[in-house]
Image: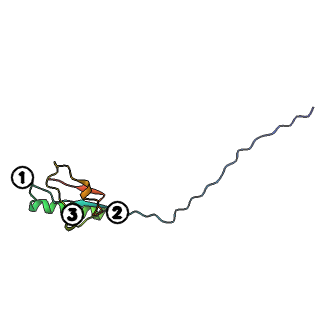
Amino acid sequence: MMMTLTVAGVTHAQLRVVITEGQVAPTPIAVADFTGPDGEVTEIGRQMSAIISNDLESSGLFQPIDSAAFIAPPKSPSIRPNFADWSPVGAKGLLVGS
């Protein structure tokens, strides 16, 4: 009787992935002027929103939208915004504060 011993070898498939470049587009974001306790925009609120906009833009991850393009700027962070008003200006996010 003839006996054959076969040893199964382990094979390894080699996969090579080469990434030559990536692309990250900044997210358009609307940064509204901050309001005071009475719901009105204050000078300090304008300054705060400008600083935050600059910081977001400097990160490279966000592109603040010019406030002149806002259709209906929010009056207070406690009032839910109508997000349909922000789609035409291309906003993917909205930042409000007081």
Q: Residue at x 57, y 59 (%)?
A: 17
For disc 2, the marked residue is: 26
Disc 2: CA contacts within 10 A as few (<14), some (14-19) or many (>=20): some
Q: Amino acid at mark 1?
A: Asp
Looking at the image, which residue sits at the far left? 38
Q: Position of residue 47 (x, y in %)?
A: 14, 63
Left or right: 83 as drawn, with respect to 42: right
Looking at the image, which residue sits at the far top? 1
Q: Position of residue 63 (x, y in %)?
A: 30, 64
Q: Earlier in the sequence, mark 2 or mark 1?
A: 2
Q: Amino acid at mark 3?
A: Phe
Which mark, residue 75? Answer: none
Q: Nearer the viewer, mark 3 or mark 1?
A: 3
| Front residue of this view, candidates 47 and 14 | 47
Spatial distance from mark 3 to mark 2, Cα to Cα?
A: 19 Å
For disc 3, the marked residue is: 70
Disc 1: CA contacts within 10 A as few (<14), some (14-19) or many (>=20): few
Q: Earlier in the sequence, mark 3 or mark 2?
A: 2
In the depicted structure, whether residue 49 falls above or below residue 9? below
Disc 3: CA contacts within 10 A as few (<14), some (14-19) or many (>=20): some
Which of the colour schemes (rainbow, by chain, secondary structure, one colour) is used?
rainbow
Spatial distance from mark 3 to mark 1, Cα to Cα?
A: 21 Å
In the depicted structure, whether residue 86 falls above or below residue 78? below
Q: Amino acid at mark 2?
A: Pro
Q: Residue at x 70, y 44 (%)?
A: 10
Q: Position of residue 87 (x, y in %)?
A: 29, 59
